[in-house]
Image (spheres, helix red, strand yellow):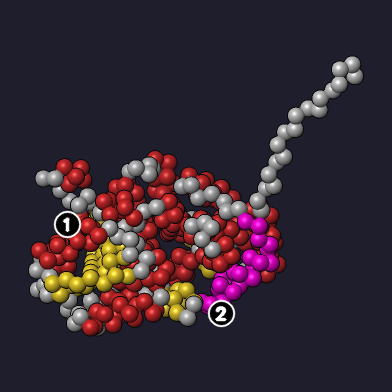
């Protein structure tokens, strides 16, 4: 047996994530990508045709390897290139991809394989979930963020310049998390996104999940890829539990941190990662909850410390409270007519609630003051020389 397989034992890590209308099985192990053909065949029955969606930037040799593995399992494959990052999440891109799949004769009884990051896998989920009854889809993520989100909370698509307005159903059948693919796709920003989602999900899921993330943060190493993957699977489980809850408040709790995060992203663009913006949103809503919902200040400090251990530092910005308030209002209005914040009463117990304008304004003023870049200190001046005899 391969030594990499021996390192994990005979069986890969496994997590089943069930949400309304879909059940996704996540398998993680070194070289697990080699099972892509057999996993897709188990979904479709008799292999016939497979569409291989490959994100721009995925090494050509990786795409060729996946193509070869699918062919070995009896599939006739054809490639569809999809753009990287947010460009993959436009409705126009989704329609272009759908046109190509239809032109190639792909039916809901055939299969879809997607290789890429969170945006690419979200596009694949939208295609699979809307292809006839639903087409089987196997995903090979290249980022930890994709492992965490793609199974249960894929990104929505944009339309007409409004990001996230078109619902994307969770529709991926199987996710194969292979460390070799992650090592080539995860950069610093993507890791920050993943870590922020780990904290966000655990904070509103349960005290046990939050304690697990705290313990993980104290021992985690960037070089321990399988350790990161294991925690990503645990986070996917937590998000799936919340996303599939019969309680609307539990489902909405996954929005914690997003109002401020989206406002900062609108104002600052890509100056920081979205994970850094989400971390600031978590700090902000925790402080709102301390004042309005009685959240224990020790929990607020524990959240701050956890985010810092993951390297999610505070965002320096010269925004005014008025600018940030306007951006928050405008970004929220694109998606809903109700401005709500998720205010935890304790870890694992949070509800969306409105916040009075005067309270929100005071917290935004404090936030902007605390994040204002500090003026550089003047360099020390040499002592003035004195003339001899003075």
Badge number at residue 337: 2
User: In the image, is residue 162 above or below residue 219?
Assistant: below
Q: Is residue 338 magenta?
A: yes
The CA distance from mark 1 to mark 2 is 47 Å
Residue 326, position in %: x, y? 64, 71
Q: Is residue 218 left or right of residue 185?
A: right
Q: Residue at x 20, y 80 (%)?
A: 104
Q: Residue at x 68, y 44 (%)?
A: 376
Q: Residue at x 57, y 62 (%)?
A: 268
- Picture quadrant where residue 199 is located: bottom left
Badge number at residue 259: none
Single out the mark in the foreground, 1 or 2. Answer: 1
Q: Is residue 325 magenta?
A: yes
- Picture quadrant where residue 101 is located: bottom left
User: In the image, is residue 390 above or below residue 150?
Assistant: above
Crowding near pointer 1: few (<14 within 10 Å), some, many (20+)? some
Q: Is residue 9 left or right of residue 217?
A: left
Earlier sequence position, callout 1 versus callout 2? 1
Residue 373, position in %: x, y? 65, 51
Secondary structure at numbered mark 2: loop
Stretch of the chain drawn in magenta: 317-340
Give the tally of numbered discs. 2
- Picture quadrant where residue 47 is located: bottom left
Residue 20, position in %: x, y? 32, 73
Q: Residue at x 49, y 57 (%)?
A: 273
Residue 369, position in %: x, y? 69, 54
Secondary structure at numbered mark 1: helix
- Quickly name the residue at label 1: 34
Q: Is residue 246 left or right of residue 273?
A: left
Answer yes or no: is residue 28 visible.
yes
């Amino acid at each position: 047996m391969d030594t990499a397989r021996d390192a994990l034992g005979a069986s890969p890590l496994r997590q089943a994530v069930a949400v309304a209308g879909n059940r996704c099985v996540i398998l993680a192990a070194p070289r697990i990508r080699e099972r892509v053909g057999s996993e897709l065949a188990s979904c479709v029955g008799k292999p016939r045709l497979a569409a291989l969606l490959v994100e721009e930037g995925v090494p050509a040799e990786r795409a060729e390897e996946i193509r070869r593995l699918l062919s070995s399992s009896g599939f006739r494959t054809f490639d569809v290139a999809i753009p990287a990052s947010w460009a993959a999440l436009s409705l126009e891109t989704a329609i272009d991809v759908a046109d190509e799949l239809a032109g190639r004769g792909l039916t809901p009884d055939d299969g879809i394989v997607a290789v890429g990051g969170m945006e690419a896998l979200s596009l694949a989920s939208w295609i699979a979930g809307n292809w006839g009854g639903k087409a089987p889809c196997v995903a090979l993520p290249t980022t930890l963020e994709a492992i965490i989100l793609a199974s249960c909370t894929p990104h929505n698509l944009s339309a007409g310049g409004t990001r996230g307005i078109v619902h994307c159903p969770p529709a991926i059948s199987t996710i194969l998390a292979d460390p070799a693919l992650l090592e080539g796709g995860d950069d610093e920003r993507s890791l920050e996104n993943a870590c922020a989602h780990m904290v966000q999900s655990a904070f509103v899921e349960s005290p046990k999940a939050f304690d697990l993330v705290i313990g993980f943060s104290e021992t985690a190493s960037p070089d321990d890829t399988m350790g990161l993957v294991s925690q990503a699977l645990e986070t996917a489980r937590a998000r799936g539990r919340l996303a599939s809850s019969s309680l609307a408040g539990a489902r909405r709790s996954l929005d914690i941190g997003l109002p401020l995060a989206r406002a900062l992203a609108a104002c600052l663009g890509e100056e920081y990662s979205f994970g850094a913006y989400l971390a600031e949103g978590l700090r902000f809503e925790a402080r709102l909850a301390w004042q309005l919902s009685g959240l224990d200040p020790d929990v607020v400090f524990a959240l701050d410390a956890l985010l810092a251990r993951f390297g999610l530092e505070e965002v320096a910005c010269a925004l005014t409270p008025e600018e940030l308030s306007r951006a928050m209002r405008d970004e929220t209005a694109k998606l809903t007519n109700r401005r709500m914040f998720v205010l935890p009463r304790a870890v694992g117990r949070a509800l969306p609630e409105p916040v009075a304008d005067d309270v929100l304004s005071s917290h935004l003023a404090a936030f902007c003051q605390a994040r204002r870049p500090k003026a550089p200190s003047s360099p020390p001046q040499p002592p003035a020389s004195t003339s001899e005899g003075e």
